[in-house]
Image (spheres, rainbow, N blue to C red):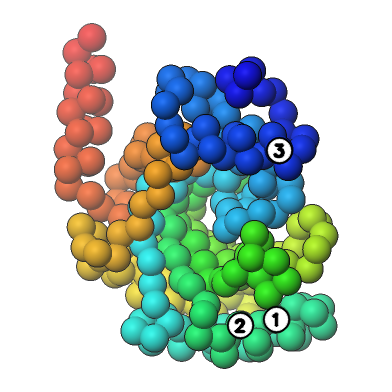
């Protein structure tokens, strides 16, 4: 029975699990378990959009879609940043970067998240840019630029403290891609990254409660999407309704 599946190890298992998840007639606790198994299978094989660095020790609390044809402020900076650093990547990735930057089919997503890395906490965003793989439409070619501020003593630095770029075209293997970590020493690029960081923070507020918000039915069944559990005192991503809710909860805890 589908509710007894412990691991997906065949294409038949994969299809039946997917069907059970999309029909959503099973109890939630079973759907949660199935989704974890399903996502583990997809992650190991790099099927679909999500990647390991967007899943573990991380919670995405807001998602948007952006459009390369409309959002030129984002796309122009993305192009500059990638081309300025293209020599850090292997030949296959270089070709992919140049190709996707000129591909009208490319899609853009913007994910805002809380993230723990080692013992450090961060709040930030992932600017995601990709397309259906030219080799197999089950897979995606993907580029991520991850920009984060560190949280120290429950307070966001509001600075660009962590910068990572993942370039991950689908080429048939399951190896994790090279990650490029940048800092202020990359003078030529850092100014563009800082501008991008500031623009994306503004997009968080401008696009909230608009048609730009993106939601997928599977989000309610995966642990890396959800509400923020703890909000920094001076967060970059202020949400009036949620902040009042958390403050109210904190006051209740103090009185119990």
198 shown above or below 224:
below
Residue 183 lies, in percent from the top left, at 61, 71
* Secondary-structure class at tag 3: helix
- The residue where tag 1 is placed is 96
For the C terminus, the quadrant is: top left
User: Given the current orientation, which residue lies at the most extreme top position?
Assistant: 256
* Secondary-structure class at tag 2: helix
For the N terminus, the quadrant is: top right
Residue 146, quarter of picture = bottom right
Residue 129 lies, in percent from the top left, at 53, 72
Q: Residue at x 29, y 69 (%)?
A: 202
Question: Who is closer to the viewer here, 3 or 255?
Answer: 3
Q: Which mark is residue 12?
A: 3
Q: Are marks 2 and 1 in contact (CB under 8 Å)?
A: yes
Q: Residue at x 47, y 39 (%)?
A: 22
Tell whether 75 sits left or right of 236.
right
Tell whether 181 sits left or right of 171.
left
Q: In terms of sequence position, does the residue under pointer 3 or pointer 1 come before the other? A: 3
């Amino acid at each position: 029975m589908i509710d007894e599946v412990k691991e997906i190890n065949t294409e038949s298992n994969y299809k039946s699990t997917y069907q059970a998840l999309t029909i959503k007639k099973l109890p939630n606790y079973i759907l949660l378990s199935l989704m974890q198994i399903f996502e583990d299978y997809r992650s190991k094989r790099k099927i679909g959009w999500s990647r390991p660095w967007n899943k573990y020790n991380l919670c995405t609390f807001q998602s948007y879609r952006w459009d390369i044809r409309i959002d030129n402020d984002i796309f122009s900076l993305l192009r500059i940043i990638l081309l300025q650093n293209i020599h850090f990547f292997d030949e296959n990735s270089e070709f992919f970067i140049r190709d996707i930057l000129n591909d009208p089919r490319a899609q853009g997503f913007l994910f805002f998240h809380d993230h723990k890395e080692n013992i450090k906490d961060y709040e930030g965003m992932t600017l995601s840019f990709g397309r259906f793989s030219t080799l197999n439409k089950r897979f995606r070619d993907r580029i991520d630029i991850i920009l984060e501020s560190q949280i120290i003593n429950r307070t966001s630095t509001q600075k660009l403290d962590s910068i990572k770029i993942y370039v991950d075209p689908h080429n048939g293997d399951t190896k994790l891609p090279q990650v490029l970590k940048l800092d202020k020493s990359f003078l030529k690029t850092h100014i563009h990254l800082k501008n991008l960081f500031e623009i994306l923070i503004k997009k968080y507020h401008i696009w909230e409660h608009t048609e730009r918000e993106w939601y997928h039915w599977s989000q309610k069944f995966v642990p890396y999407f959800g509400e923020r559990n703890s909000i920094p005192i001076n967060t970059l991503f202020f949400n009036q309704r949620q902040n009042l809710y958390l403050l109210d909860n904190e006051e209740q805890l103090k009185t119990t």
